[in-house]
Image (cartoon, coloured by chain):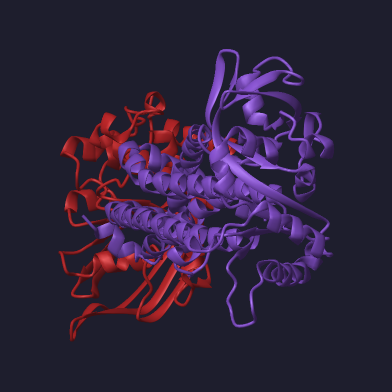
Amino acid sequence: MRVLLFELKEGLMIALRAIASNKIRAMLTMLGIFIGVTVVVTMSTAIKGIDNSFQQGISSLGSDVLYIDKWAWFSNVEWWKMRNRKNITMEEFEKFKNLAKLPVAVAPVINSVQTVKYQERRVENVFINGSNADYVKTTNFTFAEGRFYSEIESNSSRQVAVIGSEIAKKLFPNLSALDKTIKIGGENFRVVGVLAEQGSFILGPWNPDNQVYVPIGTIFKNFASNRWRSITINVRAAGPAMVEETKAEAEGVMRKVRGLSYDQENDFSINQQEGLQENYNSVVGVIQIAGLFITGLSLFVGAIGIMNIMFVSVKERTKEIGLRKAIGAKRRTILAQFLLESSVICLVGGFAGLIAAVILSMLINQFIPTSIQIGSVVLGISISLITGIISGLAPAYTAAKMDPVEALRYE
Amino acid sequence: MNIINIEHIAKIYKVGFEEVHALRDVSLKIDKNEYVAIMGPSGSGKSTLMNILGCLDTPTSGKYEFKGVSVSDMSDNELAKIRNKEIGFVFQTFNLLARSDAVHNVELPLIYAGVPTAERRERAIQALIDVGLKDRLHHKPNELSGGQRQRVAIARALVTNPSIILADEPTGNLDSKTGEEIMVLFHEIHEKGNTIILVTHEEYIAEHAARIVRLKDGLIESDERVERRYIPKTKNTLVT
């Protein structure tokens, strides 16, 4: 063991001397690994960041919520067929609510895009979510301040609003939004609640943080064009295990409400976040495969570069190898010397790559929340070490099995 | 006791389909503290003999005992160990590591012997002082003259206290004056009780030895004790 440690240390010293005596060449060689590791680590960090945001976002939607809609989120039904479907109306919602027994909450939803203002501050293109007091039960909302609007407020279409955290940040940068009067599309609304941060950037305008919630009646009252639009019915099942049953019941009830006979197909769609998840998985899967391929390729090129340089280095130092063998270097000593040399080159390149990846991730963090994972660091280091050993193996073996007599005679 | 005892050694190389008999049948005994010159024209097999004596190569047939131990069928690693501990090589072209200073060049064999850093540094410096390079410890080969380079190489050969010093044309790349100085150094090394085997094709270099073995066509042509050339009794003037 001590002999091995001694040889390792001496081999390392020899390798470092060799690298130091050829700095520019070593640096150019490192570049291949540097780029490879930078790309791998940045890539995996970014994907992890997107993934985290998505999971967070999707969980804010709730995994046991069904969305009865005129439109299917993901389907192969032709869009014009869906366009020709009847709008879902408030009357249908009321009937549905009375007939469906399984849901824990049912809420009608309509969205209107408006500008929201508080004094001089304004946010454009905000999704104004109109619903009833039960809406909050179809979500997993938590509140930073205040409360959701009440049943009385929603039934009497009171001009009250609950605002998302991002909206609150933009309109009330350093004061409480509670009980302030904001203007939505020019109409006055009183803020009764502010959501805690819920979702994630990845949902864009659908992110609850970027929305404003008002009683559905106020939408119809203030923004009249919405009276002829289709609403969505949000249905919350009594837990993930009940989703399928609730869905089956919802389909039956909806058909009954619509008066469809047995030979007519559904003129509505029941959507679930599951579809979103599947769609996302397939997209991210493609990104990951493409990323893996590109980074794998750059590492492969880097490895070939190192192998090439190591072969040149062995050839160049044939006489030195002969001498070392003549004065007592064993095969494994020579093998270790060259393996260490390529490993050191790769590790240094890898570390530099990691540092670059951290900096890059910080830059990307301006757009996507990323965080360097310990796993990525370990990945980067092990990739560079393995590349070093693999690309150094063949040249080192060539050196180790050289005949000292031949090597000494080499000019 | 014999340090080297070879009996009926032959070495055959295959070059294409042809077999080259570099050594046909060579027997030789070398005792402790001998000073032997091996001579012969090129192609006589003296390089092959030296490689075998230096455990860099193994004979095709015959017996080679080094200090009573058979080395004819040793493994590569065992040969490396013998070379490291028992043999000090001095080459015609010095074979120093170009980018390393004198001390590092001299301590190289001690690294492979597993000597700890502090001790090997000390021994390397002492060896360099012994060959008269006290002021050149941290010079790199390209900052040294030919004679000084060969002194570094000699220090490297001596630093492990080997049983034999094997010098292959040690003055071949030096001018005659510097060559003489190196031969004086070898003389002193011999005086201290070392065993030296000198391979050369130059008579006036071989004259420094006490015994001359002449090779021709892979056979020993003659092996005789000779009158040694006059060596000035004064100490090597370069060693100060």
Q: Which residue shows up at 84% across the image and 64% down it? A: A101
Whether residue A234 is visible here, answered yes or no, is no
B230 or B175: nearer the eye?
B175
Quadrant of residue A79 within the rendered picture: bottom left
Residue most toward the top? A120
Residue B19 on image: x %, y %: 21, 84
B237 or B163: nearer the eye?
B163
As drawn, the chain in red is B
| Left or right of A236 in this view: A52 | left
Residue B229 on image: x %, y %: 25, 46
Residue B140 on image: x %, y %: 33, 32
| Left or right of A160 in this view: A53 | left
Q: Tell how many labels.
A: 0
Residue B102 on image: x %, y %: 39, 34
As drawn, the chain in purple is A
B224 or A29: nearer the eye?
A29
**Residue A245 drawn above or below residue B125:** below
A300 or A160: nearer the eye?
A160
Whether residue B71 is visible here, answered yes or no, is yes
| Left or right of B88 in this view: A234 | right
**Residue A311 drawn above or below residue A213:** below
| Left or right of A142 in this view: A75 | left
Q: Which residue shows up at 48% across the image and 69% down it? A: A77
**Residue A180 drawn above or below residue A410:** above
Quadrant in which the C terminus of chain B appears:
top left
